[in-house]
Amino acid sequence: MPLVFPPSSSSPGKGTIHLTLLPPAIPSFSTLSYTYPLKLLPSAPHILSAHSRKDLQPSLVQNDANLDGLSRSIPIDLTRPISVPLVFVVTYGGGLLAGDCIDLNICLDPYTRLTIATQGSTKVYKAPPPLSTDQQKTHAVSETGMISNATKPIGGYIGEKRAPDITSRQDLRVRIGTGAGIWLGPDPIQPFAGSNYAQTQIFEVEKGASVGAVDWVSEGRRARNESWAMDGWRGRNEIWGVNAVKLDTTGKDPSMERRILMVRDSVILNPASVKGGISATVAGAGVFGTLLLYGTIFNPLSEFFLSEFSSLPQLGERNWGPDGQSDGGDLSTRQRWRKHRIEKEKLDGVLWTAARVRGGVTVVKFSATQVEGGRAWLGCMLREEGSVKTEFGDGALMFVR
């Protein structure tokens, strides 16, 4: 009997976000689509204040604008958006089952901005246990070693060997146009014992684009005595500089591009390759992560992290004055904040480092004894510097509250 409806062309876990800028400077989603188990929830955008737009050009100011309730007295810079949309990336059940795959593609047109957040930590649920010897005997195995569909075990296991499709996976690819920017501020990945997870995040930036991305993972469910008990965890972050090749005066051909790899950061957690498991090598850390910063929007934050790292006490350094002062004078507001932060870092077991690598990308690595300690430290740094909240709104710091 012929099918009444045509077959579906959608793929599970597939999502697409395309953000454009309508005249004069209003961001709008031309595409926002997703399929189960992925869900994309747009929230109220952050309105960029006139105070944050310090680089206005007189030729770009529209004095008679009255858009979306904005006052006519607010100048509008056509190279900067009026607002920054916030999108929550959600999975049904709050996590990924074994074999779930998420594939999200984001395209930001020139001079747009976007904040990506989550509503909580992304759980990676454990895979089904391998079949016992008695269970294996109940399945009919052909001479070629293949299990028939009627008797194939749930989860794709064959003995103690796990099938490749048992890995939970998230892939993110972001294309950022000229002058655009994205802030990726998710809660940490929380892999349960016996889980297997892999992720790839690739950012392609055009001239003048900016990227700020946090990527962190916790040890699992400490309340259930889980400490880095996952079967495997792999993560890779890449930032590529993209320049279209100009063919003639009519424009540029997007099919011909020069791609320059500016940074590739990979983390592989494989308990089978470490004696005693992963927990024996992390020195008591319960969470660790990476912060990547690139572009003009994040230059102040990059300089702040580099400056604070250079101000940390050095090994063998002698303190000649009271309370960390070399001259015994009064501490400034920033010095008092820094002193309190360093004391809190010791209590929470926070270790961190920052460096600027090829292409002007700033890489910050951090770890803490518990998730809340790492969250408190990262939130303290971001709130003190302040540019993320100013440029992307309160929603950009939701993950460190």
Image (cartoon, grey):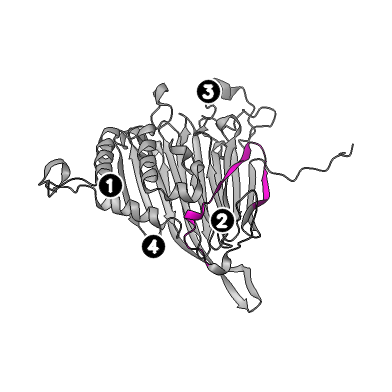
Q: Outermost residue, right direction? A: 1
Marking on residue 149: none
Say if residue 187 shows up in the picture.
no
Mark 3 falls on what kind of element? helix
Checking the image for residue 74, the label placed there is: 2
Mark 4 vs mark 2: in front: 2
* Horizontal arrangement in the rendering, residue 392 relative to residue 273 (left or right): right
Gap between marks 4 and 2, in whole Å? Answer: 39 Å
Residue 19, compared with residue 89, is above or below; it is below
What is the total number of numbered labels drawn onto the structure image?
4
Picture coordinates of residue 393 (x, y %)?
50, 45
Residue under circle 1? 334
- Say what amino acid the circle numbered 4 marks: Arg
- The residue mark sitting in front, 2 or 3, is 2
**Dot 4: few (<14), some (14–19), or many (≥20) neighbours within 10 Å?**
few
Q: Is residue 190 magenta?
A: no
Residue plotted at (68% across, 50% down) = 31
Secondary structure beneath label 4: helix
> The disc labelled 3 sits on which kind of residue?
Thr
